[in-house]
Image (spheres, rainbow, N blue to C red):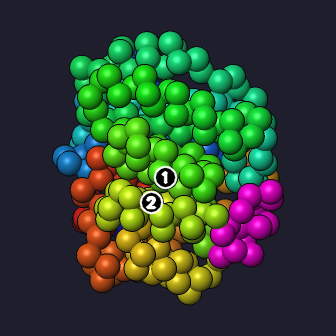
Amino acid sequence: MLWRELKARLLSHGSAKLTWGKSAENYLAHSAAGPGAGGRGAVFFASGAHRVKLSINPASPIEIVHYGNGAADLLFEGLHVRGNLLESGFHCPDQAFITVTGSCIFKCRYCNVPRLSRQRKSIPEIIRMVESVKDRISAISITSGVQSSVEEEESYVMDVIRKLTRFGLPIGVAIYPTEETPDRLRALGVAEVKFNLEAATPVLFETMCPGLDYDILWRVLDRSVRLFGRNRVFSNVIIGLGESDEEMKACIDKLASRGIIPVLRPLNPVAEMTATPRPSAERIQKIFSLHSQALIAADLDPRKALTMCTNCCGCDLVPGRDE
């Protein structure tokens, strides 16, 4: 079986039960942002150069057996895949992917963060986090909720980034932007940015993200391509919010044609979306094919990503990486 077919099947479930003869605590990753926030944690299972992130769920039909020192097998529908668990920097392997503010004034229907109301990390705390993993990471990625206003959050994140440049690592940033965010991040030496459309159509965006502005995201994405260049600008789009395949294709094509790499994330049904099923493996693979074709046509290459989700590729099928 091709890796992309297996990974699509794994992502359609999104979770695994973890059993071990020796503790796997060192391999557990915890999310402080997005739909995975507040869960039991997750593991990254790797087979050769490929990887997938699966949340921990004792009722999952997928089993990962850990034998110690990361050695692990994945068991699913009669398949037995040998591999290993990857140790995270923070949130994902090879990066310190840090959520600055673990709360949000907005209430996107697919996101757990507003329900958790976690605190903002101080700058000394963030520096200590990066210091603790600096010998095993190749990048720093920053995301954040919105504590009081978009403008105040941006200002605080800029202060964080000024302190993180001392590590000499590429920095990627994914925050809700103002019109000036790309210019300010570029001036600080940020390598890559991700501003998330989340939904494939403006109608779905209005339903899923009340109070947020779909049009500003397009303006900021276009500005970011001019500032950061091609293969350095990304945007999450969730698969399974109610869009048709044709609507998803149109969104993918529009992003790619403007030099933006789409990050296509299968829905994790939490918050207000608990009754909505995850997309099927067949649909994930179909969207992957559309994604691949659009990137080839636009001469974009996700393998060049230095930071954030496209570099990690644990939660999504990524053209060029998951072949």
Q: Position of residue 20 (x, y in %)?
A: 39, 24
| Place of residue 35 in the rendered image (x, y in percent of width and height, measured from the top left) | 63, 46
Callout 1 crowding tier (Cα within 10 Å): few <14, some 14–19, many ≥20: many
> Where 232 falls versus 174 (above or below)?
below
Most foreground residue, 209 or 213: 213
Residue 93: image quadrant is top left
Label 2 sits on a secondary structure element that is helix
- Does 240 appear in magenta? no
Residue drawn at point x = 68 percent, y = 42 percent = 151
Look at label 1 and name its amino acid: Pro
**Residue that label 1 marks:** 182
- Residue 157 locus on image (x, y percent): 55, 33
Q: Quadrant of residue 263?
A: bottom left
Q: Position of residue 22 (x, y in %)?
A: 35, 17
Does the segment drawn in magenta span residue 208?
yes
Contact (Cβ within 8 Å) of mark 2 with mark 1: yes
Of the 4 image quadrants, the one containing the C terminus is: bottom left
Q: Residue furthest left?
A: 48
* Range drawn in magenta: 201-215
Q: Residue at x 34, y 46 (%)?
A: 191
Q: Nearer the viewer, residue 143 or 17?
A: 143
The secondary structure that most of the magenta stretch takes on is helix
Q: Is residue 127 above or below residue 248?
A: above
Q: Is residue 188 left or right of residue 271?
A: left
Q: Which residue type carries mark 2? A: Ser
The residue that disc 2 covers is 224
Residue at the image position 41 percent from the left and 43 percent from the top: 187
| Residue 72 visible here | no
Task: Name the residue: 48% across, 64% down.
Answer: 223
